[in-house]
Amino acid sequence: MLAAFPLLSLALLAANLIALSSATGFGYALFSITLPSTGSLAISAGDALVISSLILLYFEIFKATRTGSATILDHALSLLVFIIALVEFLILPRFAHAAFLALVLMTMIDVIAGFTVTIAGARRDFGPVRQE
């Protein structure tokens, strides 16, 4: 059952905590790093969300290559995560931020990639169709 858990739901949960708990939301500065060029790289909560979500997206796409009964539940739950994220982005003003838009797009890519990999795997399992 844990294999069917969509990892990007953790990013969505973190985004909800960021948007609803802080007055500055996704723009909240977490830390700043001075680079060798003496430039400063400031990482905000939105930046950290996008970076961590990209890592989770990699593992989600890797999970899509598995076969089994849990993959259908995983695809359905990933679709639910995408729908929830899209509704939050469109309806709630606190989520109108580029970092959250990136998360919505990542959940959409997860859904599309999951179905694409599954369909390609199913075609491979059934073999080529003969044209007579």
Image (cartoon, rainbow, N blue to C red):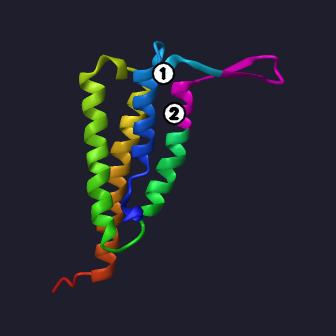
Q: Which label belongs to residue 49?
A: 2
| 20 is higher (above) or lower (below) than 75 | above
| 68 is higher (above) or lower (below) than 49 | below
11 with respect to 89 (left or right): right
- What residue is at 33 percent from the left and 66 percent from the top? 71
Badge 2 amino acid:
Leu
Badge 1 amino acid:
Phe
Other-residue count near label 1 (Cα within 10 Å), few / some / many at <14 / 14–19 / ≥20: many
The quadrant in which residue 68 appears is bottom left
Q: Which residues are magenta?
A: 31-51
- Tell whether position 70 is magenta: no
- SS label for mark 1: helix
Q: Which label belongs to residue 26?
A: 1
Q: Residue furthest left?
A: 132
- What residue is at 33 percent from the left and 44 percent from the top? 108
Measured as percent of width and height from the top left, residue 91 is found at 23, 23
- What residue is at 47 percent from the left and 48 percent from the top? 57
- Tell whether position 32 is magenta: yes
The quadrant in which residue 88 appears is top left
> Who comes first in sequence, dot 1 or dot 2?
1
Measured as percent of width and height from the top left, residue 78 is found at 32, 51
- Mark 2 and mark 1 in contact (Cβ < 8 Å)? yes
The quadrant in which residue 48 appears is top right
Measured as percent of width and height from the top left, residue 43 is found at 62, 24
- What residue is at 31 percent from the left and 17 percent from the top? 93
- SS label for mark 2: helix
Q: Is residue 59 visible?
A: yes
Position of the N terminus, as image quadrant, is: bottom left
- The one of 33 and 113 positioned closer to us in this rendering: 33
